Every structure is written in C-alpha cells, then in structure tokens.
Image: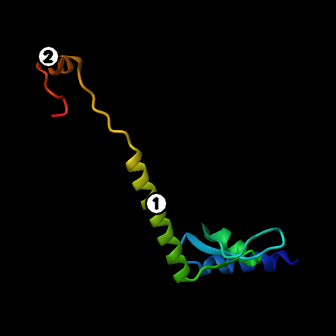
Amino acid sequence: MDLRLYYRKIREIEQSIPEQYAVVVSMDTPDGGKSGIRTEVLRLTAARMVVEGKASLASEKDAAAFYEGIREARRIAEEEAARERVHVTLVSESDLRSWKGSGKNPKG
C-alpha cells in the first residue's frame, strides 16, 4: 500500500466536505460492519472511512433524514422526561399549621 496515495486521497475527500461533521452510510465489511447505518462523524473520520471502503458519504437527502430522525428522537425524549418530572411544593411549617387549624385545603 502506498501511504502517500492513501493520505492524499484522505486529504482530497476531507477538503471536499464543507462542514466540520459529515453523515456517512456504512457498508458491509469483512470484519462485521453492517450496511446502511447512518452516522455523523468528523470530516477527517468520514474521509478515512470512505478511503478504507467502510462507508460512503450520505447524500443531502439521507443526511437531512438522519438529522430529522435525531430531532424527532430528542423531542420524544424531552416529552417523556417532562412527564416523569415530579412536581414538589415546599410549604413552611407555619403555613401548614395555619391550614390545619383553619380546616382549609392547602391545594386551594
């Protein structure tokens, strides 16, 4: 393997990626890599994966779908976290005594 050619290809691909991060789509590899898995990686990592034949750069459409999936997953997780939050009201002892003595319901 010609290391100069290897690193030249990595630099060329890295320079062709405009953003700091890129979405790559994995390919089947002999070491167990599964095809079709989309992942966001650093530009250098993306270039290295492409040169090594482990992934290809995602199309704009695939990248947009990937980011939309992440936004949707985050929205769902935030909703679930909001539902699980426990609401606690702190009441001073003097307020509690006054409510007990007056027979009022502290909730209103």
Quadrant location of residue 8? bottom right
Disc 2 residue type (three-letter): Gly
Q: Is residue 62 left or right of residue 100?
A: right
Q: Residue furthest right?
A: 1
Residue 99's quadrant in the figure? top left
| Residue under the image location 53 percent in, 82 percent down | 60
Looking at the rendered structure, the kind of residue marked 1 is Arg
Where does residue 47 sit, x and y in percent of width and height? 68, 74
Secondary structure of the residue carrying tag 2 is helix
Q: Which residue is mark 1?
A: 74
Which residue corresponds to the image point at 13% horizontal and 26% vertical from the top-left? 104
Image quarter of the N terminus: bottom right
Per the rendering, the mark at residue 101 is 2
Report the residue that reaches farthest toward the front.
Answer: 103
Outermost left residue? 102
Q: Nearer the viewer, residue 75 or 39?
A: 75
Q: Which of pointers 2 and 1 lies earlier in the amino acid sequence?
A: 1
Image-based side of 21 in relation to 37, left or right: left
**Which image quadrant: the C terminus?**
top left
Mark 2–mark 1 Cα distance, whole angstroms, equals: 47 Å
Q: Taking 79 as reference, is 57 above or below it?
A: below
